[in-house]
Image (cartoon, rainbow, N blue to C red):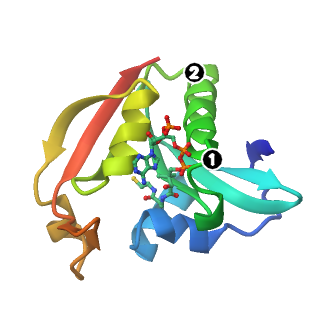
Amino acid sequence: MEIRKLSPCENYPMDLLVSADPSRKLVEGYLKRGECFVAVIDKQVIGVYVLLSTRPETVELVNIAVEEKQQRKGIGKQLVIDAIRNARLQGYKTIEIGTGNSGVGQLALYQKCGFRIIGVDKDFFLRHYTEEIFENGIQVTDMIRLSQDI
Ligand code: COA
């Protein structure tokens, strides 16, 4: 598997990107402002993440996703590690990530990769999404914010 920056002549893997964030509008905004990286096996894009500069020396890892059939094989972890490495190479001092209150697997993954919970953006998903979202039988209402000094 190769993880690399998406080249300007390639299409964004939109299906994968919206599996991490159902708001196409928010995703398109992230893509305009951020850098998109992909995981590729046999010329097929099976994973993605976007690095988005948010404040001086701070970058946010957004829209990380792995194709459903390839999940739970360690690819998500490799993508998070790669994002941290790229953020460090680009001179950022802090990397942040946010996930829904229902994201049990995501919270495990991010903490295993060194992120610590720093806060809760209460009602984020109620404010920014028109439809109700459920995951693991839990309504997605709040965004759990995590951060790591790098
Ligand atoms: N339940 C519990 N733990 C989980 C999990 C789940 N569903 N998915 C991942 N983990 C944890 C495990 O602890 C695992 O550690 P282990 O290898 O010691 O068991 C660790 O995360 C790494 O898992 P990995 O196989 O690298 O993750 P992945 O390739 O399945 O990718 C996601 C994880 C979140 C990127 C993937 O599930 C995905 O694309 N989900 C849909 C999109 C999404 O929700 N993106 C995140 C938005 S915040």
How crowded is the residue under tag 1: few (<14 C-alpha within 10 Å), some, or many (20+)? Answer: few
Q: What kind of element bears circle 1?
A: loop
Q: CA distance from mark 2 to mark 1?
A: 25 Å
- Viewer-closest of 134 and 89: 134
Q: Which mark is residue 101?
A: none
- Tell me if 29 is positioned left or right of 88 in this view: left
Q: Residue reaching furthest right?
A: 42
* Rendered image quadrant of residue 135: bottom left
Percent x, y of residue 66: 59, 57
Inspect this view and state whether residue 100 appears.
Answer: yes
Identity of the residue drawn at 33% across and 29% down: 147
Q: Tell me if residue 28 comes above or below residue 74 in the rendering.
A: below
Q: Which mark is residue 88?
A: 2
Q: Which quadrant is home to the N terminus?
A: top right
Identity of the residue drawn at 48% across and 58% down: 30
Percent x, y of residue 63: 49, 55
- Viewer-closest of 79 and 125: 79
Identity of the residue drawn at 43% across and 29% down: 112
Q: Name the residue that disc number 1 marks.
A: 73
- Asked whether mark 1 lies closer than 8 Å to ligand 1, one says yes
Q: How many marks?
A: 2
- Viewer-closest of 30 and 4: 4
Label 2 amino acid?
Arg
Percent x, y of residue 37: 67, 48
* Rendered image quadrant of residue 76: top right
Percent x, y of residue 25: 42, 74
Badge 2 or badge 1: first in the primary sequence: 1
Q: Tell me if residue 127 comes above or below residue 56 in the rendering.
A: below
* Rendered image quadrant of residue 118: top left
Label 1 amino acid?
Lys
- Tell me if 66 is positioned left or right of 143 in this view: right
Identity of the residue drawn at 58% across and 50% down: 49
